[in-house]
Amino acid sequence: MTTIPDRCEKSDARGVADHCRVGADDALRIRWPRPAAEGERIVLRHERSGEVRAGPLSDDRRSAVLTVAGLAPGRWDVLLGADHPLVTDDPGFSFDGLREYAGRARDRAVRVVRLPDGRAVLDVREVVPHAEVEEVHPLDGEIGITGWPAYAGPRPGGAARLVAVAREGGGRETWSARLDGTAFDARLDVRAFTRWEPSLWDLWLDAGDVHARLATFLDDAPWSTSGRARRPRGRTPRAPGGSWTSRAGWSIPRSAASPSTPPGRTRDSPASCAGRARTCWSPPAPGST
């Protein structure tokens, strides 16, 4: 019986792809540094159903382009020929590429995943619009948040709102937000939470017909098998007191709604709230988004 490692060795002999990514136009593009064997083709095979989608290589056999629009959710094996796994040294994505892809309105997302042994597979998931957080700035009792709408398409500039909804007690607070079509900018005042009983507050962006959860799903941190990501590099948000998990929706925890009150200051004191604002940013409990 031919094992997966055996098949990968055969694929290595056929050439390792140095580019394997899905573009914003829902096309899978693959390139090799040397021509593939004559008669080869790219085959996508759905792991669960066995459904197949195939396409030819280019005339010089150094590249292939295959549409992935309409693929069923789940894992799709990427094969060279009938049963040889495609091997690549490309990680399969970049942050800029993910942002361009998620910048278009869509209800299903396709992403290349490179397995530890080098095999490329497609991960197809159903998605809903969310507000991708890029930067968080806690300062002086306020939290500034910038980001952009993901999977919603460009939004006309105009009125938008940052909404905080308490998971317990019925609390709701809103602040105005700026939206220029591809980015949003909002600022919340943590002192607003002192009017309510302590609770965990989920954050949303309302813009026209879109009600989008604030989240960090598209950073360039690979997920580990434990479900916790390594700290992102570069432009992804830093959240004082927070942790990075695979369910990275953003919330204000209970402690921000009832800041500690140093002697001589009232609970509503801006100075006491400002001190807590620096440590009040964390994701919600697993399963809550």
Image (cartoon, rainbow, N blue to C red):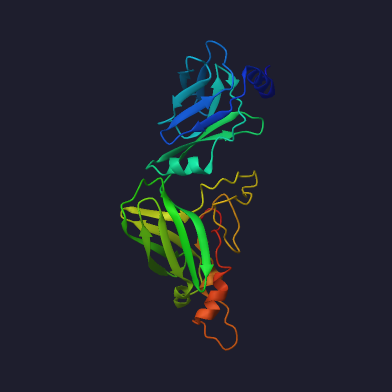
Image coordinates of residue 73 in percent, x first then y, are 47, 35
Quadrant, the N terminus: top right
Q: Is residue 95 above or below residue 262?
A: above
Image coordinates of residue 19 in percent, x first then y, are 55, 29
Q: Residue at x 52, y 16 (%)?
A: 61
Seen from the viewer's position, the closer of residues 241 and 156 is 156
> Residue 250, can we see it?
no
Image coordinates of residue 182 in percent, x first then y, are 38, 50
Tell whether 206 sits left or right of 168. Answer: left
Q: Residue furthest bottom?
A: 264
Q: Residue at x 34, y 56 (%)?
A: 207
Q: Is residue 266 above or below residue 215?
A: below
Seen from the viewer's position, the closer of residues 176 and 210 is 176
Image coordinates of residue 183 in percent, x first then y, are 40, 53
> Residue 238, can we see it?
yes
For residue 264, which quarter of the picture? bottom right
Q: Residue at x 41, y 31 (%)?
A: 69
